[in-house]
Amino acid sequence: MAGKVLRRAAKAAAAGMMHYSGVRKAMAAYRRSQSGGRRILIVSYHRVVSDFTGELQRSIPGLLISQETFRRHLEEAHAAGYELASISDAVDVMAGRRTAKKDLCVVTFDDGYRDVYRYAYPVLKQMGVPAITYLPTAFIDTDKRFNHDRLFHLLRRVQERRFHPDFEAMPGPSVDLLGPILSGHKTVSAALDDFIGEHPTRILTGIIDALEKQLGGGSDLVPEQGDVMSWDEVRTMARDGFEFGAHTLGHTVLTQEPTPVVEHEILESKRTIEREVGIQVKDFAYCNGWYSDEIIRVLGQNGFRSGVTTEDLPNRVGGDPFTLKRKVMWENFSLGMMGDYSSALTVCQFDDCFGVLGMSRPVLGRRPHSLAPLIGSIPGANVIIQDTVLPASTLTKVTPVEVVQVTEPVLVTDPRVAAVVGGTQVVVASDVALAPEAAQPEEIQ
């Protein structure tokens, strides 16, 4: 804790020096020249709340910002010389279809939390600031909660009850997720980031469901906070000119999912918004900020014009509209040395002063698209490689290079067999018998 306070104090002091000495403006000019003549800052928020201190006791801190701090963010961006613009404007400027007289700042919200409707929407409307909200449509008009909120709430219950989960009765990877959190080595957010980089959403859901069952069920295991907008609320905002984008159906991290799931999650999310709200959906937010070439291909082929990441890097005029960079903001990004709001620190965050100085390390969102979920998505599946059949379980010991070294195409006529993925000659079937002469993992070259 003392270390965090010292780091915060040092950062606030550095921000004050840069802001009041004019160094910040010089850094802004440098970033502007790097970005092709105009900076396009895209900021991301999740939940805007009325009582930050109270909500902090029961919710993931990094998702929260108070209504007052949010308002001040908009004011600071305007005072720092940004035009508060729409995602449509930003994409057009990046593509060279229009010229901006000022640097642009685009306000975005992920997940469609009802807090945005309650506390951000009135501020945006009053100040005349455009914004876009990315919706995971399977949660709209329901009482469901996101997996990250469910897990955070359950872990609070575990701590309160001094409960020790029975990992033997939970899905295998549960110890990889819960162990570092319960031991205090990782925060919930950090552990989730690491876990979902290696496991598909259904594994995370299975762990949460199992933990809920071990705790005995009951209404107190479902978080009250974290509720999501209704379609009526979405339509109200849309009538006032606010934009909406797709964010999958079930808040699914797509880099761990096979192409059919990717297409379904993206297209059904888009179609649902268009049907319910009567607008055209052209923009997408990658869950967790993670994306792949395959996901970009699906977006490009289905009428999307942009995709936003959570990579805290500058956007460049002429850059790829499907890898738009965003700065994820929350309350503490504006806290000064004494724990109060700091204008100097806020504008230094917006102008990426700490990035220019190399004091921040952006997490890159581009990920390889995993083949493993395709294999694991069919229980008991075996894998045919040329004339050899292997159980999917053996592939955990085989590298991707070893798997795809195939010289002749596989001809498949059985409709039960899935299509070839990514051009490799690997075919998944749910009921192919394992040949007795099947090669061992070390024999596949």
Image (spheres, rainbow, N blue to C red):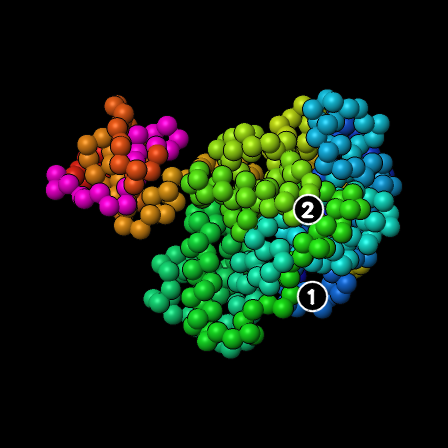
Task: State the residue position of label 2.
Answer: 277
Residue kind at label 1, given as amino acid type: Glu
Q: Which mark is residue 306?
A: none
Task: State the residue position of label 1.
Answer: 55
Q: Nearer the viewer, residue 66 or 278?
A: 278
Q: Could you say which quadrant of the image residue 160 lies in?
A: bottom right
Q: Is residue 389 visible?
A: yes
Q: Could you say which quadrant of the image residue 365 lies in?
A: top right
Q: Residue 425 lies in magenta, yes or no? A: yes
Give the extent of the magenta segment: 420-437
**In the displayed structure image, the side of residue 175 where residue 13 appears, left or right:** right
Task: Report helix, strand or loop for mark 2.
Answer: helix
Q: Position of residue 315 (x, y in %)?
A: 68, 31
Q: Position of residue 59 (x, y in %)?
A: 63, 63
Q: Residue 362 lies in magenta, yes or no? A: no
Q: Nearer the viewer, residue 4 or 209?
A: 209
Residue kind at label 2, given as amino acid type: Val
